[in-house]
């Protein structure tokens, strides 16, 4: 493993990931990530764990479970949702506590209906919670989390999950199947509704870039 890959952030790892997908396929790419991520710093691992989703291999959930740790960014949970983490798996993570609990809470929130502030590929994939629990089981699990760990981070997550509970529990049609996520990453334009989402994202990011350039140009 070369030093440039070991120190690669999410942007720098992109080309390496694409090359692996094209040359070794999803299974080989997952094996490469499972070898790479434990060797990276915690902050880089928190960024790059999202690449596990776009292997389209459900075994990536085991890699996530084994690797999750501080800092527990939203990437851990959104990756779990993209890979189709079930309610049974999420409930187990909630019971484990610590980083697993935070990942589980973020995964539940990632199962809400696609929103413009989500990453564009996540909006297109539109993951749906498998084996949806009953409303009472859902509420009881969240209440148990608050009772056991009433930290500000957990309280905020639970409030958001309860706000979006109807979406999280009521959605049925996933946008892109887990096994098609590599193809989504490599060629998103081919999926229904993708162009509108990608165009909107480009418009927003272009506006941000222009605002920064305007600000810099006014500096002395």
Image: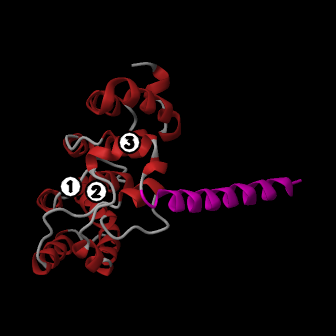
**Label 3 belongs to which residue?**
183
Q: Is residue 76 above or below residue 126?
A: above
Q: Residue at 27% across / 66% down in the picture?
A: 173
Q: Say which element carries label 1.
A: loop
Q: Residue furthest right?
A: 220
Q: Are marks 2 and 1 in contact (CB under 8 Å)?
A: yes
**118 relative to 70 in the view: left or right:** right
Distance, label 3 to label 1, CA atoms, is 20 Å
Whether residue 130 appears in this view of the structure is: yes
Closest to the camera, between mark 3 and mark 2, is: 3
Q: Nearer the viewer, residue 93 or 133?
A: 133
Q: Main secondary structure of the magenta part?
A: helix
Which stretch is magenta? Answer: 192-220
Across and down, in percent, residue 212 comes to: 73, 56
Q: Is residue 8 above or below residue 48?
A: above
Distance, label 2 to label 1, CA atoms, is 5 Å
Across and down, in percent, residue 18 comes to: 44, 32
């Amino acid at each position: 493993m070369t030093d440039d890959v070991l120190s690669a952030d999410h942007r720098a790892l992109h080309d390496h990931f694409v090359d692996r997908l094209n040359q070794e396929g999803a299974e080989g790419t997952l094996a490469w990530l499972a070898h790479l991520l434990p060797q990276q710093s915690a902050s880089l691992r928190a960024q790059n764990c999202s690449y596990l989703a776009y292997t389209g291999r459900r075994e990536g959930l085991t890699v996530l479970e084994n690797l999750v740790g501080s800092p527990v960014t939203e990437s851990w949970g959104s990756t779990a949702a993209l890979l189709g983490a079930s309610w049974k798996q999420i409930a187990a993570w909630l019971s484990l506590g610590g980083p697993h609990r935070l990942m589980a809470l973020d995964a539940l929130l990632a199962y809400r209906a696609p929103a413009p502030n989500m990453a564009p590929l996540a909006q297109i994939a539109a993951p749906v919670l498998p084996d949806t629990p009953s409303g009472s089981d859902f509420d009881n699990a969240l209440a148990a989390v608050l009772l056991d760990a009433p930290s500000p981070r957990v309280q905020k997550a639970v409030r958001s999950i309860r706000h979006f509970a109807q979406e999280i529990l009521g959605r049925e049609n996933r946008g892109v199947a887990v096994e098609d996520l590599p193809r989504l990453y490599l060629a998103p334009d081919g999926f229904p509704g993708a162009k509108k989402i990608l165009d909107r994202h480009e418009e927003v990011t272009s506006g941000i870039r222009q605002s920064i350039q305007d600000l810099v140009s006014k500096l002395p």
